[in-house]
Image (tube, helix red, strand yellow):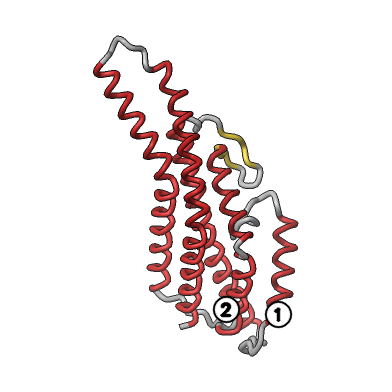
């Protein structure tokens, strides 16, 4: 579930990544708790570990989906919502700006050693939480709700510079239309919105790059808190 291996078009890459990470985790894990030997215990451990992995991947996907949502909001305000294309990775239609923000977030994640930090967090979870020993308590639901709220707030913050500028331009055009109805401002509305959108987009991308390390650190803190809650 974790980007960039969450797409449907990369099954071989996902399998290779899973096998590679598993080999590294096994070789680096020290003092891991014992594993059950009976069939029932092994089955429960497999189900529990699958749930832990899916939950961690989902939390990380929420972080990246915030930037994709910001791109959707900006694209719709700029009038580019209709200029989408089919993404074979997800079998969905996405617009250019959403894909731009998503790819930029992935790039920054790799530049800041995000995969390495995620791998170390995975090793830590195997050392502290034995297979099948995860505690699925009600507090985990609260952490998920909090993560969804953080994702929505991050999407709004990432889209705020460009969307705010476009809203102000729309407000100005509305005042001009009311003041001078004989002027045909509808003909210049879309080009003006596109120009203002691209100009403010530079500010938005610069702000994204500037604040991404802090937001990524917050996402890893959320993952750590989730794992600590699972371990009791």
Q: Residue at x 45, y 78 (%)?
A: 229
Residue 31, located in which quarter of the rendered image?
A: bottom right
Residue marked by disc 1: 26
Q: Position of residue 197 (x, y in %)?
A: 46, 34
Within 10 Å of disc 2 (Cα), the crowding (few <14, some 14-19, many 20+) is: many
Q: Position of residue 133 (x, y in %)?
A: 54, 83
Task: Name the foreground residue: 82 vs 131.
Answer: 82
Q: Position of residue 190 (x, y in %)?
A: 44, 23
The residue at the far top in this view is 182
Q: Residue at x 65, y 57 (%)?
A: 5
Image quadrant for the N terminus?
A: bottom right
Q: Which mark is residue 43?
A: none
How many numbered dots are placed on residues in this image? 2
Task: Name the foreground residue: 206 vs 127.
Answer: 206
Dot placed on the residue nearer the N-terminal end, 2 or 1: 1
Q: Which mark is residue 125?
A: 2
Q: Secondary structure at mark 1?
A: helix
């Amino acid at each position: 579930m974790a980007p960039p291996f969450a797409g449907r078009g990369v099954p071989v890459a996902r399998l290779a990544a899973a096998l590679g990470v598993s080999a590294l985790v096994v070789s680096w894990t020290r003092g891991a708790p014992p594993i059950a030997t009976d069939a029932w215990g092994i089955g429960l451990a497999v189900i529990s570990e699958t749930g832990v992995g899916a939950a961690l991947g989902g939390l990380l996907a929420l972080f990246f989906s915030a930037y994709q949502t910001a791109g959707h909001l900006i694209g719709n305000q700029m009038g580019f919502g209709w200029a989408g294309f089919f993404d074979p990775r997800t079998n969905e239609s996405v617009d250019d700006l959403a894909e731009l923000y998503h790819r930029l977030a992935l790039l920054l994640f790799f530049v800041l050693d995000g995969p390495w930090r995620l791998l170390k967090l995975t090793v830590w979870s195997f050392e502290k939480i034995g297979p099948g020993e995860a505690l699925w308590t009600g507090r985990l639901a609260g952490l998920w709700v909090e993560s969804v709220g953080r994702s929505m707030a991050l999407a709004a913050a990432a889209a705020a510079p460009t969307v705010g500028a476009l809203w102000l331009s729309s407000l100005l055009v509305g005042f001009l239309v009311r003041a001078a109805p004989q002027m045909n401002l509808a003909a210049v509305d879309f080009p003006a919105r596109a120009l203002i959108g691209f100009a403010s987009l530079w500010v938005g991308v610069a702000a994204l790059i500037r604040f991404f390390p802090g937001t990524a650190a917050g996402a890893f803190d959320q993952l750590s808190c989730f794992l600590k809650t699972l371990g009791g």
